[in-house]
Image: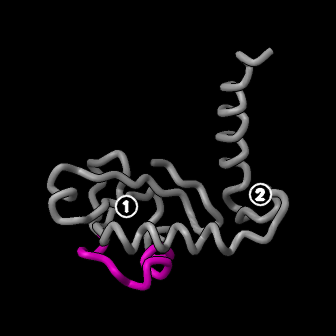
Amino acid sequence: MWLITRDGFFNIVQSDDDREKGLLTVKARKIEDLERFKQIVNGNVASPIQTSYANDYHFRIKSDKKAVVEGVASMVSAIEYSKTKPVLHKSRSGIYFQVWETLADLQKDNY
């Protein structure tokens, strides 16, 4: 699952090994995003931030699935804005807008 939020951009997946342990792997392209995510899940992580520049996402943690679900729910509960673009971090708004614009192509089939 790709998750683009004010707190960062995350890719959340579950490997076969994770499933047996009740864990999710949370990946990010920026280490600061995972630092914020650790706060969002109240530090409930099963591993320190792992760094590998050989991987597509350089940074990752494993976290209890229930903690991730509750953390994501807390991000949703905190939404108090009517438009997303104005609340994005200025340094990323251009990149996020490019993603938004690319994904807008999905609805071209509707016309």
For mark 1, does the 10 Å Cα neighbourhood hold few (<14), some (14 to 19), or many (20 or more) residues?
Answer: many
Location of residue 74 by image quarter: bottom right
Q: Which of 91 and 27 is in front in this view?
A: 27
Residue at figure coordinates x 37%, y 61% from the top left: 26
On residue 84, which mark appears?
A: 2
Q: How many marks?
A: 2
Where residue 10 appears, as percent x and y from the top left, is 48, 57
Magenta segment main secondary structure: loop
Q: Coloured how?
A: one colour
Looking at the rendering, the stretch of residues picked out in magenta corresponds to: 35-49
Q: What amino acid type is highlighted by mark number 2?
A: Thr
Q: Residues within 10 Å of mark 2 (few under 14, many from 20)?
A: few
The numbered dot on residue 26 is 1
Lateral position of residue 9 relative to residue 47, left or right: right
Which quadrant of the rendered structure holds the C terminus? Answer: top right
Residue at position x 41%, y 69% in the image? 68
SS for dot 2: loop
Q: Distance between the residues labelled 1 and 2?
A: 22 Å
In which image quadrant can residue 44 be found?
A: bottom left
Q: What element carries label 1?
A: strand
Q: In this view, does 64 lie to the left or right of 71?
A: left
Residue 109 in which image quadrant: top right
x and y, in percent, of residue 103 in the image: 66, 33
> As drawn, is 93 to the left or to the right of 71?
right
Picture coordinates of residue 16, whole percent (x, y)? 17, 49
Q: Do the residues labelled 1 and 2 touch (CB within 8 Å)?
A: no
Q: Which amino acid does label 1 sit on?
A: Val
User: Residue 83: x percent and y percent?
Assistant: 83, 57
Tag shown at residue 36: none
The correct choice, above or below, for 4 with respect to 81 in the image is above
Of the residues under marks 1 and 2, which one precedes in the sequence?
1
Above or below 35: residue 99: above
